[in-house]
Amino acid sequence: MSRLSQAKITTADHNGVSVIQSQAHASSLQQVPQLIPAHPNASGGKAVPSSNMKKPPADKESEEYRQRRERNNLAVKKSRMRSKQKAMDTQQRVNELKEENERLEAKIKLLSKELSVLKDLFLEHAHNLADNVQPPGTEGASPAPNSTAAGGQ
Amino acid sequence: MSRLSQAKITTADHNGVSVIQSQAHASSLQQVPQLIPAHPNASGGKAVPSSNMKKPPADKESEEYRQRRERNNLAVKKSRMRSKQKAMDTQQRVNELKEENERLEAKIKLLSKELSVLKDLFLEHAHNLADNVQPPGTEGASPAPNSTAAGGQ
DNA sequence: TTGAATTGCGCAATAG
DNA sequence: CCTATTGCGCAATTCA
């Protein structure tokens, strides 16, 4: 990461432009396809103002071309930065959620323990009651209607 | 998303190669930056075997060059795919964790409710005991040692 | 030294 | 028309 070269922004030397050009034969180039065969509405026809009409490949030389390119390059850079940022945020979110999860899980553990303690106390007490009451007849006393919850998921 | 063009893989027409070549001036290029300022060993020698020595810019024509390029292009594509996949996985993970979180939260709610019910029963019972016992002297009986939990968060 | 993997960058097509 | 995205290739670096 971090280059040392490429620190010069601002149009200066965008070497990368693809110094390729290698086979710079001698064909084509700057032959602005100004083709306009039959030409705009010869008879009565509308040129369909904002419709198809491929736009000439833009002369690489063109001032306007360079301007568009530069703007696009900027947009691209921006977009990519965002994308990267978003990815990092998402990763961050994962970490946060993981932590939150652990916390919740711990809390559940605690609550469960508390619950079990209370339930035990309850049962114990119920037994004591049963022992004291000594119900007549049926030896199978049933003092515990098990009231509320019991089988939660 | 989804393009219809660019479905042709396999080296075929990599148009994009940068048909630029535009200003195929005649400057620079192939001036191998063999710069060696003051330079390596003036006196004793040794070309410092594995050190600088920028390898010639590789003739774009070269067969080997094209091969390297193609391999790299492949690697790049692969790498980017992975990167993208990883991002998606991370996003997916976020969703899963969110769900898990909701589940846990619901469970906590449930447990809390159960706990509170049991605690209430306890208190009620304690009061009943107090009423029955009818402690002598002090009217403020204290049969409830509040045992276990009590001040959770 | 070498080859694959990453990364920054620009181009062009195209989506919005 | 303009910006935002996206796939692609190049080249410089980093990793192994």
Image (cartoon, coloured by chain):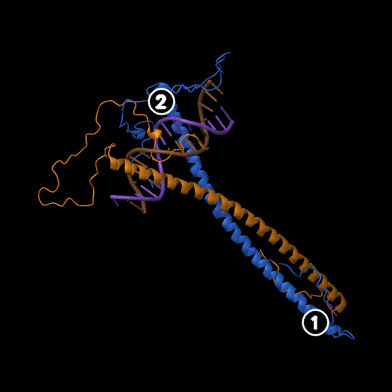
Chain colours: A orange, B blue, C brown, D purple
Q: Quadrant of residue A97?
A: bottom right
Measuring 50% from the left and 42% from the top, which residue is drawn there?
A: B83
**A54 horizontally vs B70: left or right:** left
Q: Name the amino acid, label 2.
A: Arg
Residue C11 percent coordinates (x, y) = 34, 38
- For disc 1, the chain is B
Q: Name the amino acid, label 1.
A: Asn
Quadrant, the C terminus of chain B: bottom right
**A107 horizontally vs A93: left or right:** right
Question: Helix, strand, or loop for circle 1?
Answer: helix
Q: Identify whether A97 is placed above or below B114.
A: above
Measuring 35% from the left and 35% from the top, which residue is drawn there?
A: B16
Q: Give the residue at mark 2.
A: B66
Q: Are marks 2 and 1 on the same chain?
A: yes
- Foreground mark, 2 or 1, reads 2
**B101 horizontally vs B23: left or right:** right
Residue A111 percent coordinates (x, y) = 71, 64
Circle 2 Cα neighbour tier, 10 Å, few/some/many (<14 / 14–19 / ≥20): some
Measuring 36% from the left and 45% from the top, which residue is drawn there?
A: A71
Q: Give the residue at mark 1.
A: B128
Towards the viewer: A19 or A27: A19
Q: Quadrant of residue B4?
A: top left
- For disc 2, the chain is B
Towards the viewer: A153 or A59: A59
The residues tagged by marks 2 and 1 sit, at their Cα atoms, a distance apart of 92 Å
